[in-house]
């Protein structure tokens, strides 16, 4: 038995309002990914945690961190609940994608339901 899809890429008629929301979120994520906001040394950071840079995580620098420090000491936090997912990590500046923005949520391990590797290192 084959499953019927609600809509395909060539369907007729207007998009469902839920489809509009999904398309808008995806477009915002692609735009943020292609043109990241520069990190100024303050606020949360979008950190590349994999070599191929597909996954991003939200990092928060520890209190008292100098804006120009290399490596940056930070804690990875959950994008929605802001609870710490790791202890303090030292992140090379080359792994910083830019300032954290909400569209990056789609690229996190938490949204995909996966855990972060406990042996994660963020050195160059």
Image (spheres, rainbow, N blue to C red):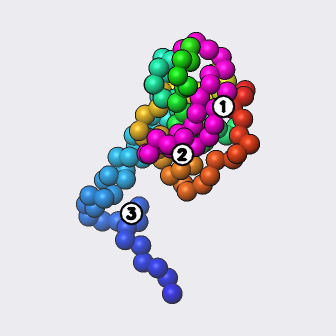
Q: Choose the circle earlier in sequence order: 3 or 1.
A: 3
Q: Which range is magenta?
A: 67-90
Tag of residue 89: 1
- On screen, 46 above or below 108? above
Of discs 2 and 1, which sits in the foreground?
1
Mark 3–mark 1 Cα distance, whole angstroms, equals 46 Å
Residue located beneath label 2 in the image: 108
Q: Decide: few, some or many residues near mark 3? Use Cα within 10 Å; few <14, some 14-19, many ≥20.
A: few
**Quarter occupied by residue 73:** top right
Mark 2–mark 3 Cα distance, whole angstroms, equals 30 Å
Q: Magenta stretch mostly in which secondary structure?
A: loop
Of discs 2 and 3, which sits in the foreground?
2
Residue located beneath label 3 in the image: 10
Q: Nearer the viewer, residue 57 or 37?
A: 57
Tag of residue 27: none
Residue at left 62%, top 14%?
Answer: 69
Q: Position of residue 21 (x, y in %)?
A: 32, 52
Residue at left 60%, top 54%?
Answer: 114
């Amino acid at each position: 038995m084959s499953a019927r899809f609600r809509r395909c890429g060539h369907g007729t008629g207007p998009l469902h309002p839920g489809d509009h929301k999904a398309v808008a979120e995806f477009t915002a994520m692609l735009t943020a990914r292609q043109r990241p906001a520069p990190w100024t040394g303050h606020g949360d950071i979008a950190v590349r945690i994999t070599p191929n840079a597909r996954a991003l995580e939200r990092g928060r620098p520890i209190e008292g961190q100098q804006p120009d420090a290399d490596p940056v000491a930070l804690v990875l936090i959950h994008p929605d609940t802001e609870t710490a997912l790791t202890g303090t990590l030292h992140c090379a500046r080359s792994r910083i994608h830019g300032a954290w923005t909400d569209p990056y949520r789609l690229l996190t391990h938490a949204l995909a339901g996966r855990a972060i590797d406990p042996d994660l290192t963020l050195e160059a």
